[in-house]
Image (cartoon, rainbow, N blue to C red):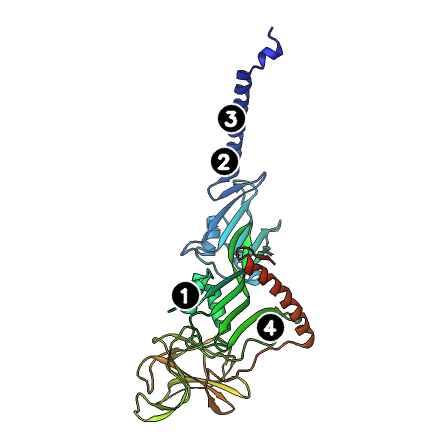
Amino acid sequence: MKKAKDIITTTNLTRIVMALAILLSLIAIFLVITRHTPSQMRTQNTCSSVVVVASGDTLSELLLAQGLTHNDVNEISKVLKKDAGISGLRAERDKLEFVRNGDNSPVSKIVVVPSPWRQVELTCDDSGAWNCQTVDIERDTRAVWRSGEILDGDSFYLAGQRAGIPAGILIEVYDLLAFEMDFERDVRSGQKFWVLYEENFSDGKKIDNGNVLAVSFQALRGNVQMYRFKKSDGTTGYYDENGNGAIKSLKRTPINNAKITSNFSKKRKHPVLGFTRAHKGVDFRAPTGTPIPAAGAGRVIARSYNRGHGNFVKIRHNGSFETLYAHMSRFAKGVNVGTNVRQGQIIGYAGSTGYSTGPHLHYEIIKDGVHVNPMTVKLPAISNLSKEDKKKFIEYRKVLDDGIEKLKQHPSLYIQL
């Protein structure tokens, strides 16, 4: 009989360790195979399959393919529409997970994922009725800071892209700054800007971008700076460093990135009529069919045609301001005299009707019955803060500014929100 010290030699010990490693690897592989199959997951007593909605798929077809009855389909459709606001599926975006208590069991739970931040759970009770519950998915939101500079031949959009700012954020920033700036004339080489905005993560993976939290631009008329702030009544807005409303009631340039072809002037030789007369608005070059958004919220007081303006829409915004949009190729559906429109709502499409030499938008602002220059007129703010909210805003802005200063020193870092 061999002694214990003779049995456990170096060679034998190596063989034992290798055998154990192989055994553990086989066990791990077996567990992975049994728990994960293509588009299917298994727990102790249940299994589930995930279906990504493809082009042409309907909810009815997908449910019937899982063995559900027509009665189930009708009830599930009603519950989704009533309790979750889901009336249809979007190809390549929505996902459905079907859960069963066993391979051959009927579907007991359906999970619809209409967005990365929300899922809808449908369960079937003992009576066969389907119940709906919406579950919000917690976001890991981070504030990131990006800065850029306008170079020779740059547009703001190109400079923003070079700074690594996402396209959607740039569009939002453009819309914010358009209340204070004319991007055709106010952008010059050497101007610097920065943006603080949200990025949303889930399980360590970036899903999408959130809100613009703050923006600064060295404009010709002085530095333009805005902060996003939530008021005590729950509404949010953008305010300057002193807490005054930064968003004006009207935009100076209704169409983003449109080039000005003719400025406001008291004396201009008309390109069609040939004689000199006042040009009471600003012309923006725009291809036929370009959507024209309302420069501010208000009520449509005219939607008509005349020889000079062609197809035009006129909007009254308050007791002092009106705007007019001329030479439209056509009007937007549902925009009629008396219609209330929101800021940014499409009211028509650019064209060349009336006295016009080519497709463009003629845009006018009328203040107290007098035509004024859209590029220079002082526009009223929509929302100012109450005394108490302004105090809270100043405190919040100071905290945010401290964070921004740190990010300026370390641009690769972020602020956890």
Binning the other alpha carbons within 10 Å of mark 2 as few (below 14), some (14 to 19) or many (20 upward) gives few
Q: First in sequence: mark 3 or mark 2? A: 3
Q: Nearer the viewer, mark 1 or mark 2?
A: 1
Distance Cα–Cα, label 1 vs label 4 = 27 Å
Q: Nearer the viewer, mark 2 or mark 4?
A: 4
Q: Where's residue 235, x and y in %? A: 61, 71
Residue 1, above or below 399: above
Q: First in sequence: mark 1 or mark 4? A: 1
Front one among 11 and 61: 11
Distance Cα–Cα, label 3 vs label 1 = 56 Å
Residue 86 makes an appearance in the image: no
- Mark drawn on residue 22: 3
Residue 32, above or below 354: above
Residue at the farthest right position: 388
Q: First in sequence: mark 1 or mark 2? A: 2
Residue identifier under label 4: 241
Binning the other alpha carbons within 10 Å of mark 1 as few (below 14), some (14 to 19) or many (20 upward) gives some
- Mark drawn on residue 33: 2
- Which amino acid type is marked by label 2? Ile
